[in-house]
Structures are given as structure tokens and as C-alpha cells.
Amino acid sequence: MSAVQVALLLSLVSLFSLPVNGDYKIGVGRYDITGPAAEIEMMGMANPSQIANGIHFRQYSRAFIVVNASNDTNRVVFVSIDACMGTQIMKNKVVEKLQSNKTFAGLYTDDNVCISGTHTHSGPAGYFQYLLYEITSRGFSQETLDAIVDGIVESIAEAHQNIVPGKLLYNTGVLLNASRNRSPTAYLLNPEADKALYQYDTDKDMVVIKFVDNNGTDLGMINWFAVHGTSMNNTNTYISGDNKGYASLLHEKDMDKDSLPGQSKFIAAYAQSNEGDVTPNLMPQHCPGHPEVPCDANSSKCLVKGKELFCIAFGPGVDMFDSTRIIGERQFDKGKELYDAAFKELSGPVQYLKVNRDFSNIELEFNGKKVHTCTPAMGDSFAAGTIDGPGAFSFKQNDTTGNKFWDLVGHLLHEPSKEEKECQAPKPILLDTGDINILYPWAPRIVPLQMFRIGQLVISAVPAEFTTMSGRYLKNAVKKIFNATGDSDIIPVIAGLSNTYSDYVTTYYEYQQQRYEAGSTIFGPYTLNAYVQEFSKLAVALATDNATGVDKGPPTPDYYSKQKSLILPVLTDKQPKGKKIGDVKVDVKESYAINDTVEVVFWAGNPRNDRKTNSTFLTVEIEDNDQWTVMYTDASLETRFKWEYDHSDTLCIMDEIFDGGCTSHVTIQWFIPPDTVPGTYRIQHFGAYKNDGVHQYQGVSGTFKVTKM
């Protein structure tokens, strides 16, 4: 054999031994999931007075499909939604709609679709099937559920249509200035040896997966970083994606500069991770109205003239909108830096495994003794809230004794047994939610556990909020299993608040202090250990490519037919006297300068009449040669849309029932950014009013000049 032939043979051997360029086919999609922008309570803070009445910016579902290029049946769908969390009823309805579509039937199932919430606390509530999470929102909201489910399905459909051969590149880094621990004294209770492995008491790691087609075109990105969606506080009434939604829109705009928000070709998901004890409110907790009074580190309360007050934390901005911007920008800045430097390529199998487990009684070993999880129950510290959103009455964090009065009230619903009290100890049981079935179950017992593997990336989709150290324990356990089978470069990720919601997960040690997170760890002190045990089984199955023999567990509960609601429908919208709905009530000024705020008020209909899905309630337009071009919408970070009745809500509800309705108006604001082109502008409002049917309308402001000075 000649030297030329030998060289050719070696080249061929080398060619076939290398990974084939593009192990995957990939697709990305996005769709609007903005729910009713009026009269529906928000999910997250459990504050009945926090009722939506406008839009800070729109919320989206972002879907990412990865298919094994050599086997189309091996595919996974990761969906990140600008909502507080994924829920069981949401997942059930999404899968139903996918399976009813001939294109998707058999392709996208309960097993290979993951729905993860970014955990914004500024979206409409009512999309659960367990009553505890619906009490403060007046029950179930079909409007909210439909908006989210339809949007998720549409985003998956778009991702499916966009599937092309491509690559997945990854990068990791550390973001230091966007989070801190809101229960640091509980974190300190973890074993010294375990804490010594980490420099920080929150998970500062950021993981970025870059989606690129084989032509080198940037398609999208998933970014996992742990921080709560509570930059917008519990007084906010604007629908908002909070800091993660803000970061997503910034990244999409940066990659497609001429696009309007929600319309970019590039799709960026800033997804959630183990954020249970992680706050974006970077300023220290303080005593409201009395900054000179110290806050107790364990209870997060302060004493003023013999009265205990809840301590709160804000910042780093001057208000919640500014804080959302700052924390969003910091995530985007680091995310973009990691994205631009992502050159390492994922390669290997696409695998998935999803099981259901009854977490009310999982047996395991802890410190050499046999233990088990508990029937769901909420502790007194749950009712105390957090420094992000304090609770009410005399509740406080770090409560291991309980309050006789409130415990008596809670136990009227169901008296926990001696065994349940012992199982949950040292948590005093306020609400024995696992055994309360008034109307329908109050809390889940059966929860889904799901794991995806895409080459080196292993995603543990957890149906809860894991604290910092809880997430670290789980990631380490998963990584150790894959390492033992020869996969030394595994990238473990926690995808938080996925598929259903079962409150919090603390470590056994953090549980002993009973801060808010521990009071909300519903399955008792060994909850994390049970999750580690059960997820480890999934990891073993995927690492050994032996998933077929895994017990899938009991069927997924479905209580959709039992849902109850006290939310009143929109009956009618009243025309203003001598005016039409859509007319200007308060017009713009003649001119504005850069950094000014433009404001216009229109007579309006209720935004619930038409959510303007994938559309807008407003446009800011510039004139150019007698043509008007849209520059901003209600999805833009530079606008704000607020709806309200012209009288008190109570009077208007009575008028609506007995006197033909109540007039209402919308206030539209445009915060003129520094890069605005000087010129002639106008603002349009689009909506629908209800009066013998639903009717579309629009209104337009007067024209105004924008100048540099």
C-alpha cells in the first residue's frame, strides 16, 4: 500500500470516528400567553388585593425542540413560560391539545414535553387544579388557563415547523450581582463540609445552551439561572414577565434589532432553576417606616412600640420597575457574554424519562435510619410570607411552636393526626392540606418527575421550588451517577417549577429552622432526600440506557371537571356620556423631549373582552412621508398600559349588574428612550367593548413632536 493510500485510509478512519457535524435537529418557537389584563388576581404573592389592571410588558411561551438526527422518535421539548409555574392542569390540557392534532399525535407527549415557569409573580392566577393555590384568586380562571395553554401549544407548533439540522453549543459562568439568599440563617444550618464546597450561599452558576443551524445562523438560547421573579413586588398590578422576561426581550432585541418585541426570529428563554431561597431584592431587609429599628434575622420581624411588623426588602432600583430593569439587564449581560463565547458542542443521545410518584409516603434511609415523607401540610411560617412579599396577622418565620389560635382555625378544616404532626415536626401544622378535600383536593400527593438528556446536558425537571443547597445536592447526585458510567463531562441543570407545583423543597437541616421555605415544604423534613432518591433512579436508567423497565407510577390526577370559580364575567361596557369608547379622554401635549414620559387617556372597554393575543392594546408610531410606522407596542419595555373604572370597583360592579355598566378608561404611557429618532409621533389604542356582543374599537391620540431637547 502506497503512502498516499495509507494517508487516504487514515483520513477516512478519522472522518468516521469523529462526531458527525450536527447530531441534532432543532427547532425554536414563541407565542403570546398574556392572560386577562383586568380583574383577575395575580399568582405568587397570595395577595387578594393584587388584581391585574394593565400590562408592563407581555408574557410569552418559548419552546425548544431537540431531535436525535439519526432517530426521529428520540426528541424532547423544553418550554419556558413567563408564568409563575407549570401546573398539572396546564400540562394535562397542553398534552390533550397536542395529541388531538394529527401532526403531533405520538410525537409530543406527557413524557417528552417539559413546561417550566420563570416564576414571575406578576401574571394572572387561577390555572391550578388544587384549591389551596386558587383561594386568593377567587377560584379557577378559564381565561387564564386558555391563554397559557393555547400559547404553549402554538409555541411548540412553531418550533416543530422550524426544525432544521443544527448544533447545540454550551457555556457556563458565574453571575454575582443579581441575587442573594433571603433565608441565610437557614442556609447556615447545612453541614460545614457541604458549605465548604461553595463560595456563595446562593447558586451563582449560569448555564447557556446555544441553538445554531448548520449554516451558522443563530436560532435561540436557553439560559438557566436561579433567582426569584419578585423584582415586581406585591403592590404591582401590571402583568409582567419580571426580571427574566425582561432579560429575554433584551436578548431577542439584541439579536434582531429591527424586530418588535415578541416578533424576533431569535428566541431567548431565561429559564428558572433552584431559586427557592434566592431573592433579586438586593437591599437588606428593613422595618417598613422605621429603618432605624433592627430586623430579627430569624423571624424577619421588627418590634415598633410593642407591635411586630414584617420586614421587607427591595432594590437595587429606585422602584420595582427600575429593579426589574437592573436585574433583567444583569442576567442579559452575562447571558449574552456566555452566549457569544459558547463554542463547546453537545453531542450524544437524546433521552427522556418521566414518572409519577406519590410523595405522601416515600420510604428511604437518612443517617442510617429508615424514614419516610409525609402527607402534605403547610406550616405556620408559610403564612408569614417572605421579605419579598410579607404575610399577615401574627405569623412569623422561624416558627416551630405554632400559634394556638391560628392552628385551631386551620384545624377546623381538618385536624391532623398525631402521626402527621410527628412526621412534619418540627413544623407546626397550620393547614393539613393533604387531607382536605373540600370541593376538590387542596394539595398534590402525586407529582411528576422528569429527566431529559441531550448529550452532556442532563435536565432534572422538578415540580417545586428547590433551595440553593437542595438543588446542589440533587445536581451532585445526578452528576455522580453519570460519572460512574463513564460520562465525566455531564452538565446537570435544575429546571424549576416544572409540570406541576408542590411548593418548596429545603434540606433536612434548613427544615429545622422553619423559615418560610421550610414551612412550605409540604412533604416533611425528608422531602429533598426523597427527590434525590427518586431522581437518582431516573439518572441510572438514562445513564445505562435502560428506561423501559422503570415503573411509571400512578396515573396523573385530573380535577378539571371539578373546578369552581367566583370570578364574575364582563357583563357590559358603558359608553361615556356624549363620547364613544375609543375617544381620547385626556390627550397628549404638543411636544416632548428625550427621556420625557408621554401620557394619553382613552375611554375604553374591559381588556378581558379581547386579550389581543399576539397583538397589542397600543402602538407608538412615527410619521415618515405620510406613512405611520409602529415603533413600540404593549410588549415593549418602554411602554405601560393601565385600565381602570371611572368609579370604585365595588360601585362599578353594582352598576354593571343593576344600571347598565360603568365607564372605564386606559392610560397609555411611553417612556421616551435616549435613542429615539426625533420626529412626529402618535399613539393608538386598540380594544373591544361588550354591549349586545363584543365589538372592536380603536382610538388615536393627537400628533406630537419628539425633540432632542
Image: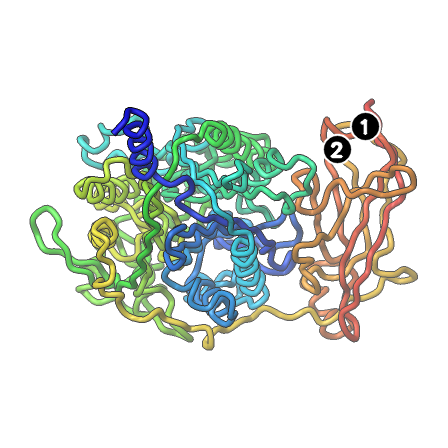
Q: Residue furthest front?
A: 1
Left or right: residue 196 compared with residue 519: left
* Other-residue count near label 2 (Cα within 10 Å), few / some / many at <14 / 14–19 / ≥20: some
Give the SS element for disc 2: loop
Location of residue 29 in the rendering, given as x and y in whole percent from the top left corner: 55, 51
What residue appears at the point 33 percent right and 57 percent down from the top-left corner? 378
Q: Is residue 532 visible?
A: no
Q: Residue furthest left?
A: 368
Q: Is disc 1 in contact with disc 2, using a CB cutoff of under 8 Å?
A: yes
Give the SS element for disc 1: strand
Location of residue 656 in the rendering, given as x and y in whole percent from the top left corner: 73, 70
Nearer the observer, 17 or 529: 17
Nearer the observer, 680 or 422: 680
**Residue matched to label 2:** 672
Q: Is residue 524 visible?
A: yes
Q: Which amino acid does the dot numbered 2 rest on? A: Ile
- Total labels drawn: 2
